[in-house]
Image: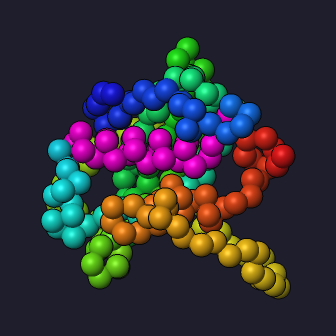
Amino acid sequence: MRLMAEKWIEEYTIQSVDADYRGDCRWSSLLSILQRAADRHVEALGISREEMIERGMGWMLITLELDMGRMPRDMETVHVETWSRGSKGALWHRDYRIKNADGEKLGEARSVWALVDIHKRKILRPSMFPYEVPIGKESVGELPNKAVLAEGVQLAEAYTYRVRYSGIDVNGHLNNARYAICASMCWTSRSYGKGK
């Protein structure tokens, strides 16, 4: 793990608990790895989780677009690079790049986050964040678009998801990594496996 100017690079070896029955890293595990890298980047900048909680602040994932050429495998070491792309309006943007130990790119992600008041459960403007966050110069692509339904589309309940003990984090909320999986549940043509 190391901080290189505005970029954080973290090494992680996929463990058996992270992998599915085929030996591929689970989506939920990969999202947890990305979230952990972002948390450690913020901590490396001198912004501790404890201090954020004392100030009543937390991060909430709004949108994440993850494009994987292939999923990491059981016992494979990956390097996750992450950096802030700054804020626009009330939202913060963060990019990720995932590589294997040989430097081969496995995937990239773009994400949108909100800084929230954890007690009032409302979004805070970026100017409320009392720390300097360096902005990365790189980009892995356009920011994720807000999902817009085509006119005339009728929505119907697809399934019910029961939040269980394993999904609740230390803040008493459904964790971002679990939320992203619950919210998507299906793969798009841009995702690993091309809709398999």
> Residue at left 24%, top 39%?
44
In the rendered image, which quarter contains the N terminus?
top left
Q: Is residue 26 magenta?
A: yes
> Residue at left 21%, top 60%?
52
Res 37 → quadrant: top left
Q: Residue 155: percent from the left, percent from the top?
A: 77, 82
> Residue at left 47%, top 41%?
33
Q: Could you tell me what secondary structure mostly forms the magenta stretch?
A: helix
Residue 20 appears in the rendering = yes
Say above or below: 181 vs 189.
Answer: below
Q: Residue 65: percent from the left, percent from the top?
A: 60, 52
> Residue at left 45%, top 29%?
12
Q: Residue furthest front?
A: 165
Q: Residue furthest top?
A: 102
The image shows a total of numbered marks equal to 0
Q: Which residues are magenta?
A: 24-45
Seen in the image, is 163 located left or right of residue 22? left
Res 172 → quadrant: bottom left
Say above or below: 1 vs 94.
Answer: above
- In the image, 123 versus 177, the foreground residue is 177
Q: Residue 91: percent from the left, percent from the top?
A: 41, 65
Residue 142 appears in the rendering = no
Q: Is residue 16 magenta?
A: no
Seen in the image, is 166 located left or right of residue 155? left
Q: Residue 189: percent from the left, percent from the top?
A: 79, 49
Seen in the image, is 18 located left or right of residue 116? right
Say above or below: 77 vs 34.
Answer: above
Check the image and tell me how it is coloured. rainbow
